[in-house]
């Protein structure tokens, strides 16, 4: 390639033990592995080995942007963090992502990624200023909240000149679901990457300055693809009102696609939050966002338990903090939930684990008469904001039973005994939604979906019944975390209703496997660009509701392939692009088989626990065998076949897989 487009050309390696810096040549791995997630996997195969645990100094963290970063590509403000993550049960190589302007500034500083290795003797933070890296002592920062410490760093390096990712006390204290966060809202979410950085004594990564140096081969083609993706920017007025009411919500039609059948989606997206006497400002969580999916900033909200004003963001699943309080009698209900929400971000928690896992578990066990209150050392009251504050601090600083909960809900119930603390079925009102907007639910008291992650009700509670969860269960089986972040099958698929209503053999239907495979490949490729989850869900979000290609298998990767070609100048057809997803998926499989002892039995045992008698597991065996075969793996063992490795250009994986008896 005579000229280099899209990539910066190098990846920064940081040895935290020695303080040394070096670089890795990006171009060795592209276009074969696309970028981002794909390159990180190739590096992992080369540099990681079996037996490494998440908190070991030998554990490496791969922080990757991609060809979309720093360009006009839509939704391109994402960066991937990959490594051995502690929230996974058991610990496995996992990825998570976060938004912001960080990925663009990293590219502008001349890097396609960062590799962190080793462990610092003392707390420190990494600075990359105009391309030059340095490690600085974190004196005065270690022990501070995620938001507060970043405010100090912004003041130090210039608010409009730097972008920061960092951790809070939860990460410092190795809480297994601690986040890496950016300000008052952005987070890596699932995985516990904040705890990995905490184990390495790395408080933050600060990017300063940098110049725009991302060359785009065909700007006109990139702009055309962007305009097709989303031809208009979403309205972002400053409003007062209740976003759960159609008449007060300026985004209602866009959230529903103008179709009444999806009104519930608009209500759920902001949680029907009431009692909001503050202006609402729609704010994107990342660079390159053309619409904003439903995150909102609230400024100068009075704190309830202390003097002062609070500024923060809420939206999507994060509104559950406010939902626990918004329909109570009395005053300052929104303020109570919002204060709890901002505290959770300040401490550096994964909101999913708290809101969909631990708190509902404490609530449901109490409703069923299962004594968890004596374990906590206090009565459980999910409508009491002071109870929430005590709970969050107990976990963040590992006090009392908080030390057990710091290991995550899955490890907690496994330790206490799943027969009593996981499997008992709760039937009643959903923990966060009572009052005049009740939502009845029926599922186990511990909302666990597999590999240590809360399911958010996805596998256990679906309007079409458990049978509708088959494609999602397949995705979950081969993953190492919840696949909902990018790989979840799009429920708006044109053939979905036909499958549910007309298909006589739900378990043997080729549609189930095709649906799961397309969702998996699509999610992988999104993490390679990387872009945000709006790419696979843009139809679901009402952006291009009538676009036939969206959600339709390999055709839905066409736009991404065009963007990749326009930015890099490397012509790649949709079929070739999709095949790259298959290649990267198989490389993931090889890593899990070699380093994390992944087997078909391990996957079967896990999904059987998760589905917990909700589907016919005997019939599901056929579905799983068909799934493995569709991925190029042995129908029984789930190991990649030699024929498939050759087809994917991955023959180099065969010797090590054969050596450990895991070549299909």
Image (cartoon, helix red, strand yellow):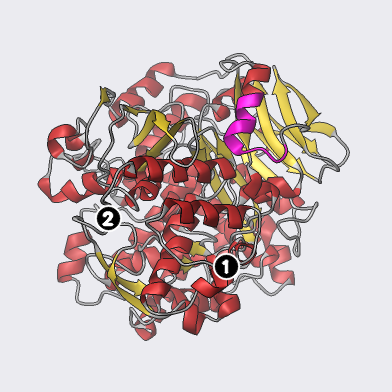
User: Between marks 1 and 2, how big is the CA–CA gap?
Assistant: 31 Å
> Is residue 148 in the magenta section?
yes
In screen coordinates, is 247 left or right of 619? left
Taking depth in this image into account, of 209 and 407 the one nearest to the observer is 407
Please give the label number shown on residue 641.
1
Q: Position of residue 523 (x, y in %)?
A: 44, 49
Helix, strand, or loop for circle 2?
Answer: loop
- In this picture, which residue range is highlighted in magenta? 142-152
Q: Height in image: 496 above or below 112?
A: below
Please indicate whether residue 645 sits to the left or right of residue 199 in the image.
left
Mark 2 burial class by Cα count in 10 Å: few <14, some 14-19, many 20+ = some
Mark positioned earlier in the residue sequence (1 or 2): 2
The residue nearer to you, when weighing 402 against 285, is 402
Where 27 sits versus 349, above or below?
above
Residue drawn 71% across and 24% down?
128
Residue 10 is situated, as x and y percent measured from the top left of the image, at 69, 29
* In this rendering, position of residue 501 left or right of residue 517: left
């Amino acid at each position: 390639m005579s000229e280099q487009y899209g990539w910066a050309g190098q990846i920064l390696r940081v040895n935290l033990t020695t303080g040394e810096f070096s670089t890795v040549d990006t171009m060795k791995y592209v276009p074969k592995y696309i970028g981002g997630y794909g390159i990180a996997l190739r590096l992992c195969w080369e540099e990681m080995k079996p037996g490494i645990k998440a908190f070991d100094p030998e554990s490496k963290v791969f922080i990757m942007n991609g060809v979309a970063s720093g360009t006009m590509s839509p939704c391109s403000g994402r960066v991937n963090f990959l490594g051995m993550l502690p929230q996974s049960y058991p610990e496995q190589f996992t990825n998570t992502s976060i938004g912001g302007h960080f990925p663009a500034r990293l590219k502008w500083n001349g890097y396609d990624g960062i590799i962190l290795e080793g462990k610092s003797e003392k707390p420190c933070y990494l600075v990359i200023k105009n391309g030059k890296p340095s490690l600085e002592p974190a004196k005065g920062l270690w022990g501070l909240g995620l938001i507060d410490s970043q405010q100090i760093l912004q003041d130090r390096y210039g608010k409009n000149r730097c972008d920061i990712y960092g951790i809070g006390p939860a990460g410092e204290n190795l809480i297994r679901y601690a986040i890496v966060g950016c300000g008052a809202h952005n987070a890596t979410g699932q995985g516990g990457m904040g705890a990995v950085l905490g184990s390495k004594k790395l408080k933050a990564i600060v990017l300063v300055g940098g110049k725009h140096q991302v060359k785009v081969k065909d700007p006109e083609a990139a702009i055309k693809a962007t305009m097709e993706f989303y031809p208009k920017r979403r309205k972002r007025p400053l409003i007062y009102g209740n976003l759960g009411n159609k008449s007060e919500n300026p985004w209602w039609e866009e959230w529903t696609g103008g179709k009444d059948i999806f009104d519930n989606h608009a209500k759920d997206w902001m949680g029907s939050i009431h009692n909001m006497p503050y202006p609402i400002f729609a704010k994107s969580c990342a660079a390159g966002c053309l619409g904003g999916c439903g995150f909102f900033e609230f400024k100068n909200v009075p704190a309830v338990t202390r003097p002062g004003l609070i500024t923060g963001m809420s939206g999507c699943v994060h509104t559950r903090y406010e939902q626990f309080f918004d329909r109570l009698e009395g005053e300052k209900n929104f303020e109570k939930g919002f204060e709890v929400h901002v505290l959770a971000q300040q401490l550096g928690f994964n909101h999913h684990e708290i809101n969909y896992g631990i708190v509902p578990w404490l609530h449901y066990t109490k409703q069923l008469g299962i004594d968890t209150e004596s374990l906590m050392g206090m009565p459980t009251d999910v409508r009491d904001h002071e109870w929430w504050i005590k709970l969050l601090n107990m976990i963040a600083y590992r006090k009392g039973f908080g030390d057990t909960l710091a290991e995550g809900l899955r490890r907690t119930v496994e330790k206490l005994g799943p027969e009593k603390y996981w499997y008992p079925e709760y039937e009643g009102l959903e923990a966060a939604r009572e009052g005049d907007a009740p939502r009845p639910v029926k599922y186990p008291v511990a909302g666990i979906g597999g590999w240590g992650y809360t399911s958010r009700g996805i596998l256990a509670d679906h309007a079409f019944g458990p049978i509708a969860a088959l494609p999602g269960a397949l995705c979950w089986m081969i993953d190492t975390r919840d696949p909902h972040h990018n790989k979840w099958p799009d429920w708006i698929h044109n053939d979905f209703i036909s499958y549910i209503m007309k298909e006589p053999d739900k378990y043997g239907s080729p549609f189930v496997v095709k649906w799961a495979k397309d969702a998996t490949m699509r999610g992988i490729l999104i993490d390679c660009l990387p872009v945000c989850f709006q790419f696979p869900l843009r139809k679901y979000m009402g952006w291009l509701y009538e676009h036939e290609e969206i959600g339709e298998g390999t055709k839905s990767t066409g736009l991404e392939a065009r963007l990749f070609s326009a930015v890099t100048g490397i012509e790649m057809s949709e079929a070739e692009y999709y095949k790259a997803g298959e290649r990267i998926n198989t490389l993931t499989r090889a890593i899990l088989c070699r380093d994390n002892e992944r087997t078909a039995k391990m996957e079967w045992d896990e999904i059987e626990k998760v589905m917990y008698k909700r589907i016919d597991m005997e019939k599901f065996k056929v579905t799983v065998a068909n799934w493995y075969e569709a991925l190029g793996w042995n129908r029984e063992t789930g190991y990649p076949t030699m024929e498939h490795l050759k087809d994917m250009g991955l023959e180099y994986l065969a010797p090590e897989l054969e050596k450990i008896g895991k070549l299909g």
